[in-house]
Image (tube, rainbow, N blue to C red):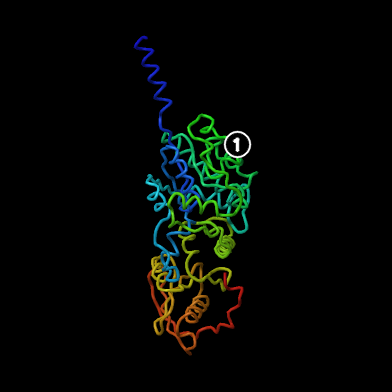
Amino acid sequence: MSQNNISQNNMSQNKQTKQRKAVALISGGLDSLLAARVMIEQGIHVEGINFFTGFCVEGHTHAIRKKDKAKPKRNNALWSAEQLGIKLHIIDVIEDYKDVVINPKHGYGANLNPCLDCKCFMVSKAMEWLKENDFDFIITGEVVGQRPMSQRKDTMPVVARESGANDLLVRPLCAKNLPATYPEKQGWIDREKMHGFNGRSRKPQFKLASEFGFSDYAQPAGGCCFLTDKSYSVKLADLWQAQGERKYEFDDIMLLKMGRHLRPRPHFKIIVGREEGENNFMEGYKNQFTSMYTLSHTGPFVLIDGKTNEDDIKLAAQLTARFSHGRDASSVKVMVRQADKKEFTLDVTPIPSDDIPKEWYI
């Protein structure tokens, strides 16, 4: 046999034994953790990818508020990568993601959650990363029938098609319920070693987690996105209405997660800190907004969003006093600090709770 033929045979063997590489969408939840592990068990080199949109639940309010003090202060996507022993790539997509939120092709779910468009977006971004880094296919933790919008039998092909991933998108937890993918057809992965999970029951996932030795993992609770939350979505819709257009900046969506929001007039609203952690966080915005806090009594830190006149400032101060420990006092001294750093004090009478219309609360 010629040296050339020997070389060609060696190249052929190398191609057959080449370790395939997959990028896994890691949200920090149990499903993505399990999906990645199933592929690792098959000898696939897996690396994780996590897209930061600004709307992620973890790492924000539960890291600030005392009522969530018992929750572990960790990034669950990073924690998942640690449990799997894989590299995690965290990618900022805040700007690119805006069009998904503002103009979802497939519409919203129960609130302002563009779940189907979101999944298409995430997988398309993973495809871009895959091509740039010479990986072979994509892994997600999706399960047929688990989510009412993006994980139905009829919408899962939409994600594969509109993302451009097509049959390079592998869903290890429900693969047996779906057509064979390219990695399966090529023999890179074994279909029989994947799963056929279906529906909203989490029992199969819990069982598989136990088999893999996972016991400490993020519990599912309606998703990991603030856009699935009704209260948050109402605040975002109010922001858009007040602005007269659908747009937002990162500071906007961060402050929607903070405090108690009231809009006493169409042209301005106030954000009232509910506890020390929120007050401290909101103080970071005192050079961008007019702010208030009580001097004579313990009370919240308050931000005013919008253009205000003298009467508006007085009303905001009365509301600030209402949410302080001086709510029953005849007079409360309030410090007002404008964004240009000019300061002055007001002595105001707190507004009685019964005099605050319910419609002021956002």
Local packing at callout 1 (Cα closer than 10 Å; few below 14, some 14-19, many 20+) is few
Of residues 326 and 131, the one nearer the viewer is 131
Q: Tag 1, which secondary structure?
A: loop
Percent x, y of residue 259:
48, 70
Quadrant in which the C terminus appears? bottom right
Q: Does residue 70 sit above or below 107 in this rendering?
A: below
Q: Does residue 22 sit above or below 257 in this rendering?
A: above
Of residues 191 and 116, the one nearer the viewer is 191
For the point 51% across and 47% down, the residue is: 141
Quadrant in which the N terminus appears? top left
Farthest residue to the top: give it.
2
Of residues 340 and 262, the one nearer the viewer is 262
Tell whether 321 sits left or right of 112: left
What amino acid is labelled 1 in the image?
Pro
For the point 42% across and 25% down, the residue is: 15
Farthest residue to the right: give it.
154
Farthest residue to the left: give it.
3
Q: Which residue is mark 1?
A: 179
Of residues 290 and 283, the one nearer the viewer is 283
Farthest residue to the front: give it.
211
Percent x, y of residue 130:
45, 37
Percent x, y of residue 351:
53, 83
For the point 40% across and 70% down, the residue is: 277
Number of callouts in the render? 1
Q: Does residue 101 sit above or below 195 in this rendering?
A: below
Percent x, y of residue 115:
58, 51
- Identify the image quadrant of residue 3: top left
Tell whether 45 sits left or right of 181: left
